[in-house]
Image: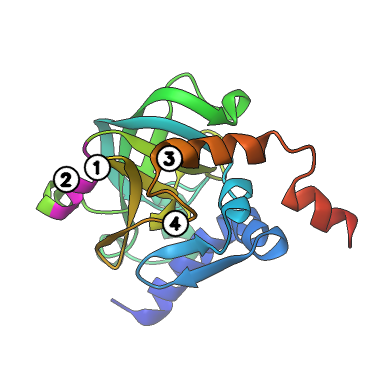
Amino acid sequence: MNRHIRNTLIFYLLLSQNSFAQLNESFYNLRHDEENGFYAVTIDDLIESSDIIVEGSYGEILSHQTFYGYGRSKEDVKQELNISEIEMSKIGLPMIEYEVVVDTVLKGKEKLADMPILRMYEFLDEHKKATIADAREGRHLFFFALNPDNITLTFRGTMYDMKEVGEAYMFLFNQVRMSAFGSYDRENFLIKIKEILNKPATIAAAKAGGQ
């Protein structure tokens, strides 16, 4: 693929998610890893950088398609980049949409759609791999971010999808199951999250006030 075309497409996709990027940089103490995405340094940052927190599970796959950016169709991108149909067939991001089965809402009930949809940017065959299939089974603690459409959901990184394993909530980091901020004790971890959510002040409000 022509590098200029690919870089231009990535620019368009990132531009459409500008507010998402600014949110990470402005308020929260997050780190970024190429393989695992963003991860929080403290439990407060994990909670504050999540728009919606729920206990639930992965539901059915609702659709799989090629994604060309929010508010852009395939034809929009083709015209903006002025490329041929052959070149167009080589770009775009594969995307799967999952239904999210919600059991308990801990944060963001007012932001949660009647039928929550999670977008994962991967090929359809990816979810069939044993490691991925296992990671998406069972009960989870989801820390969702809203996509720029303010309807569909995404994860900032692998830390934001914790699976119930025994008495713990674990996430994958470099394909190794790990706990964070006391999530090895699931019940106490949930109590801690609820206590933080009930605090009158938030990280974002405190930092905004200090600017």
| Mark 2 element type | helix
The percent coordinates of residue 115 (x first, y second) are 42, 22
Q: Is residue 183 visible?
A: yes
Query: Which residue is under mark 1?
Result: 136
- Three-letter code for the amino acid on which mark 4 is drawn: Ala
What range of the chain is rendered magenta? 131-137
Which residue is found at the position 58% from the left and 46% from the top?
47
Query: In the picture provided, is 159 more to the left or to the right than 123?
Result: right
Which residue is found at the position 19% from the left and 51% from the top?
132
Mark 1 or mark 4, which has the lower sequence index? Answer: 1
Tag 3 and tag 4, C-beta contact below 8 Å:
no
Query: In the picture provided, is 47 more to the left or to the right than 102?
Result: right
Q: Which of marks 4 and 2 is in front?
A: 4
Q: Which of 144 and 167 is in front in this view?
A: 167
Magenta run includes residue 135: yes
The percent coordinates of residue 93 (x first, y second) are 34, 57
Q: Can residue 120 be seen in this view?
A: no
Tag 2 and tag 1, C-beta contact below 8 Å:
yes
Q: Tell me the CA gap for discs 2 and 3.
A: 16 Å
Query: Which residue is under mark 2?
Result: 133
Mark 3 or mark 4, which has the lower sequence index? Answer: 3
Kindly indicate the quadrant of the structure image that contains residue 159.
bottom left
Q: Tell me the CA gap for discs 4 and 2.
A: 22 Å
Q: Nearer the viewer, residue 7 or 172?
A: 172
- Three-letter code for the amino acid on which mark 1 is drawn: Arg
Query: Which residue is under mark 4?
Result: 180
Instruction: Give the quarter of the figure containing the N terminus.
Output: bottom left
| Mark 3 element type | strand
Whether 136 is drawn above or below 109: the answer is below
Q: Tell me the CA gap for discs 2 and 1.
A: 5 Å
